[in-house]
């Protein structure tokens, strides 16, 4: 079974621009979660989508948004980029047939650099 | 405050030596517990997980972890470290009442030849 894929793998943007990252989960997985990883803050949960609905949300500003399509693929969007948005963005998928405790499988991440 | 702690930011061990990475959590009930490993520039790979049952859990790559309820700990161990184990290790927790993961700050492991 193919793993979680994320595109693009690397991105360079300038302040004020917006960016869209894509994640394709493992086949059959219905939940997709997004995380931001930075050296200073570590791994922080952004949001989780399940069956095209946002089921959980972390503590990030509204500039960070996401969506999930009927095939479970997910995108996240960051508008009005700031220097502090430079990070590795990780996507994880799980079966999530029940809430809590489902193992998450991670993609390789998209590294975003904001200049 | 509810949290996951990994007290060691960086550990260096010699190849062939034993390893223990610490993880403590502060949640009222026993959460679901995970250990992930991240190689440079890569995503996270699941090493092992604990949901319930036997408190000693076996994982991939020769790793094991022991859940100790009395100490709110879930320490990761390996009897003999290989150079390829050099990476960053993250302990993660899912509280029973929610589904989002909470990650510890990570422990970077260096392995000396």
Image (tube, coloured by chain):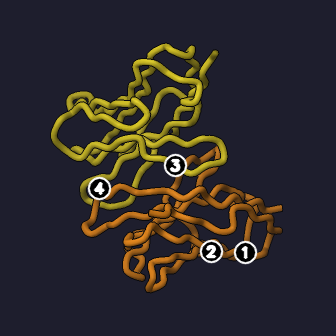
Label whose residue precedes the other's in the sequence (1 or 2): 2
Does label 3 lie on the same chain as label 2? Answer: no
B105 is higher (above) or lower (below) than B21:
below
Residues at circles 3 and 1 in contact by the CB criterion of under 8 Å? no
Residue at the spot of label 3: B44
Please tell me whether mark 3 or mark 1 is closer to you in this view.
Answer: 3
Q: Residue at x 32, y 40 (%)?
A: B26
Q: Chain of mark 1?
A: A
A64 vs B17, left or right, is right
Q: Residue at x 39, y 33 (%)?
A: B23
Q: CA distance from mark 1 to mark 2?
A: 7 Å
Does label 4 lie on the same chain as label 3? Answer: no
Q: CA distance from mark 3 to mark 4?
A: 17 Å
Residue at the spot of label 1: A80
Q: Chain of mark 2?
A: A
Q: Would you identify the image quadrant in which residue A97 lies?
A: bottom left
| Residue A99: percent from left, percent from top | 27, 65
SS assignment at label 4? loop
Which quadrant, please, contains the C terminus of chain B?
A: top right
| Residue A26: percent from left, percent from top | 45, 67
Which quadrant, please, contains the N terminus of chain B?
A: top left
Tell me if I can see residue A28 in this picture: yes
Residues at circles 1 and 2 in contact by the CB criterion of under 8 Å? yes
Q: CA distance from mark 2 to mark 3?
A: 25 Å
Residue at the spot of label 2: A63
Q: Colour of chain B?
A: yellow
Residues at circles 2 and 3 in contact by the CB criterion of under 8 Å? no
Circle 4 packing at 10 Å, graded few (<14), some (14-19), many (20+), is many
Does label 4 lie on the same chain as label 2? Answer: yes
Circle 2 packing at 10 Å, graded few (<14), some (14-19), many (20+), is few
Please tell me whether mark 3 or mark 4 is closer to you in this view.
Answer: 3
- The chain whose colour is orange is A
């Amino acid at each position: 079974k193919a793993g979680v894929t994320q595109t693009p793998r690397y991105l360079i943007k300038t302040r004020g621009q917006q960016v869209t990252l894509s994640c394709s989960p493992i086949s059959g997985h219905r939940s997709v979660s997004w995380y931001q990883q930075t050296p200073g803050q570590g791994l922080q949960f952004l949001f989780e989508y399940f069956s095209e609905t946002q089921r959980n949300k972390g503590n990030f500003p509204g500039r960070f948004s996401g969506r999930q399509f009927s095939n479970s693929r997910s995108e996240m969007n960051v508008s009005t980029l700031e220097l502090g948005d430079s990070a590795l963005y990780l996507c994880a998928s799980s079966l999530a047939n029940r809430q809590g405790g489902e193992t998450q499988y991670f993609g390789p991440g998209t590294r975003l650099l904001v200049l | 405050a509810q949290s996951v702690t990994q007290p060691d930011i960086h550990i260096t061990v010699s190849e062939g030596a034993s390893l223990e990475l610490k993880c403590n959590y502060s949640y009222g009930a026993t959460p679901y517990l995970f250990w992930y490993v991240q190689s440079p520039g890569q995503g996270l790979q699941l090493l092992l997980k604990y949901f319930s049952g036997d408190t000693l859990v076996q994982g991939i790559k020769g790793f094991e972890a022991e859940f100790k309820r009395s100490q709110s700990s879930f320490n990761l161990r390996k009897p003999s470290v290989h150079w390829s184990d050099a990476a960053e290790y993250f302990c993660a927790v899912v509280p029973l009442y929610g589904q989002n993961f909470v990650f510890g700050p990570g422990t970077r492991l260096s392995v000396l030849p």
